[in-house]
Image: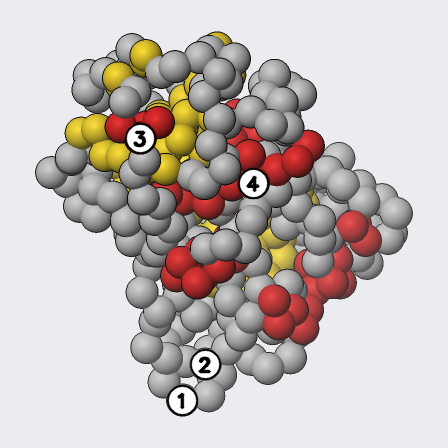
Amino acid sequence: MKIRSSLALAAAVSVLLVGCSSTNNAAEVEKGCVTFPTGKQLDSAKIGDNFGKEPKIDIAKGTKVETSQSRVIVEGKGEKVSPNDTAVADISLYNATTGDFAFKAPYNGQGSNSVQINEQLIESISAAVGCHTVGSRVAVLAAPKDLFGAQGNEQLKIGKDDSVLVVADIISNEKAPKARELKGDYKDAPKVEFPGNGEAPKVTLPDTNPPKELTIEVLEKGDGPVIAETDSPKLQTLGLNWNTGATFQKFDSVLDIAANGYVPGFSKAIVGQTKGSKILAILPPADGYGAGGNAQAGIGGKDTIVFVIDIAKD
């Protein structure tokens, strides 16, 4: 999860997760689970039950459906993937209309996609992964409106009228963190420790309510030049949700966009600082993602977020 004000999916396989999402299943999408009935087109298709390996698919060429269908091919014995959980799955796409694979997962045990089950996930992928069990193979014959919409997907050679067979092998699941039980008013700032050797800082959040105003603390002051709004300093950052305790931004990538290009509180935390500094920033919703939150990152509209920012010296 990047902390730019406008998010973009970086990995090419993430085209599986974006598209034109219909509203026919709005209630289920909001809960994080989408269900489609089965149908004769999917029932008549032959889909291999060799979980974890490339499936053999035999479906009538030219297949088109206006209403999506789903079927469990293999019922896994693992834990259930619940709303807001993050599942790792091998997800392949087969163009049922043309008879060609559009995207084939690697089937190397690592999974091609990590998906959080929430209202941001388009219906056909949510139906294939959400509320099924680890170890399951689930097939969804997706109508265009439930996958890429009227525009199709040129990159994957999926036309606007093509129906797509989605086959998902659910490999593992990370349960959504429970909200922390906070007590009293804001009293103590988070404790931050830097192990050194480029390792991620360790942050201990206090069991109190967060501050109501933007709070910025310079943990270490660098001796480099001052950062202007249009500068693009290289930095690493660790992001946590104060309300849940969950980490949503890992300290494993370097950000280098303009200082004024982040969410408001983050930009305020680095503009005017010196390069080489380490900063603690606590952002109430108004200075973060606002009342809408950021569902992809597991941030609600009332959640306060915490950043530890390590600004490179050059």
Of residue 114 and residue 185, the one placed in the foreground of this image is 114
Mark 2 residue element: loop
Placement of 214 over or under 82, stated as above or below: below
Q: Is residue 269 visible?
A: no
Mark 1 residue element: loop
Q: Is residue 90 visible?
A: yes
Q: Position of residue 217 (x, y in %)?
A: 63, 67
Placement of 140 over or under 28, stated as above or below: above
Q: Position of residue 84 (x, y in %)?
A: 38, 55
Label 4 crowd bin: few (<14), some (14–19), many (20+), radius 10 Å: many
Dot 2 or dot 4: first in sequence order is 4
- Disc 4 designates what residue? 145
Q: Residue at x 46, y 88 (%)?
A: 185
Q: CA distance from mark 2 to mark 4?
A: 43 Å
- Nearer the camera: disc 3 or disc 1: 3
- Disc 3 designates what residue? 40
Q: Are marks 3 and 2 in contact (CB under 8 Å)?
A: no
Dot 4 or dot 1: first in sequence order is 4
Q: In the rendered structure, which amino acid carries the disc numbered 4? A: Lys
- Nearer the camera: disc 4 or disc 3: 3
- Nearer the camera: disc 2 or disc 4: 4
Q: Residue at x 50, y 77 (%)?
A: 210
Q: Quadrant of the C terminus?
A: top right
- Disc 1 designates what residue? 184
Q: Position of residue 283 (x, y in %)?
A: 61, 68
Q: In the rendered structure, which amino acid carries the disc numbered 1? A: Gly
Q: Position of residue 3 (x, y in %)?
A: 63, 50
Q: CA distance from mark 3 to mark 2?
A: 54 Å
Dot 4 or dot 3: first in sequence order is 3
Furthest residue toward bottom: 184
Dot 3 or dot 1: first in sequence order is 3
